[in-house]
Amino acid sequence: MAIVELSGPVTDCDTPPLLYGGDDELGQRATMVGFGSRGIGSVGQDDKYYSSEDAAAARNIIDVVEDPAPDGKGGNQLLVDFDSEDGSTNVFEDGGSLPVDEYEGVLGSGDSGGSLWIETDEGWAIVGVNAWGDDAVYGSTGGFGRISTQYDWVKSIFDANFTNE
């Protein structure tokens, strides 16, 4: 993860998003956004689905929350899998989630750094930052760095607005 300082204020949006400070990501319906490649589950990424000027979004269920190892290394990821309509491509057995809806998906090539959002009682909050993924076909998986585990680091740099959840 990185914190980027902008050269000026953002003036073309509503309230800045919250950052998720809780630990209840598992099983949440999440929305992901990015500017990378596009595709459909049956064939994967293909240039005919892509426009470099348009952001895209997909939804998914957070299937796995990796915690750090006892030595504090590794983990701290939120994992999703791209389930087909019949559930035959469910990668994470414990997730048990069929497609959340017709917008089920994962991020594609070039979407690294894209955000993962959930809706909380306090409003929309960013829970993760896209770190990796694979082919964007049914059965593909993606991983997001957890925001909540970086709370102290973020607060040491600037006063972000975190959820209380």
Image (spheres, rainbow, N blue to C red):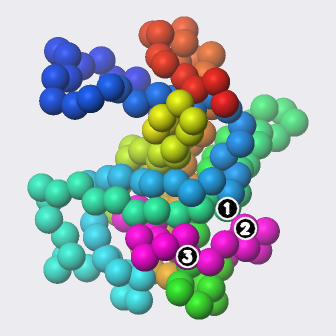
Residue type at tag 1: Asp
Is residue 100 shown in magenta? yes
The three-letter code of the residue at mark 3 reads Pro
Per the image, the residue denoted by label 2 is: 95
- Near-viewer residue (126 or 46): 126
Whether residue 131 appears in this view of the structure is no
Q: CA distance from mark 3 to mark 1?
A: 11 Å
Quadrant for the C terminus in the image: top right
Judge the density around disc 3: few (<14), some (14-19), many (≥20) Cα neighbours within 10 Å: many
Residue at the spot 35% in from the left edge and 26% down from the top edge: 16
The spot of residue 144 in percent (x, y) is 54, 49
**Tag 3 residue:** 99
CA separation in Å, label 1 and label 2: 4 Å
Mark closer to the observer (2, 3)? 3
Extreme residue in the right direction: 70
Label 2: how many Cα within 10 Å (few below 14, some 14–19, many 20+): some
Span shown in magenta = 91-108
The CA distance from mark 2 to mark 3 is: 11 Å
Q: Is residue 99 left or right of residue 52?
A: right
Instruction: Report the disc number at residue 63.
Output: 1
Q: Residue furthest front?
A: 121
Asked if residue 30 lies left or right of residue 91, the reply is left
Q: Amino acid at mark 2?
A: Gly
In the depicted structure, whether residue 43 falls above or below residue 146: below
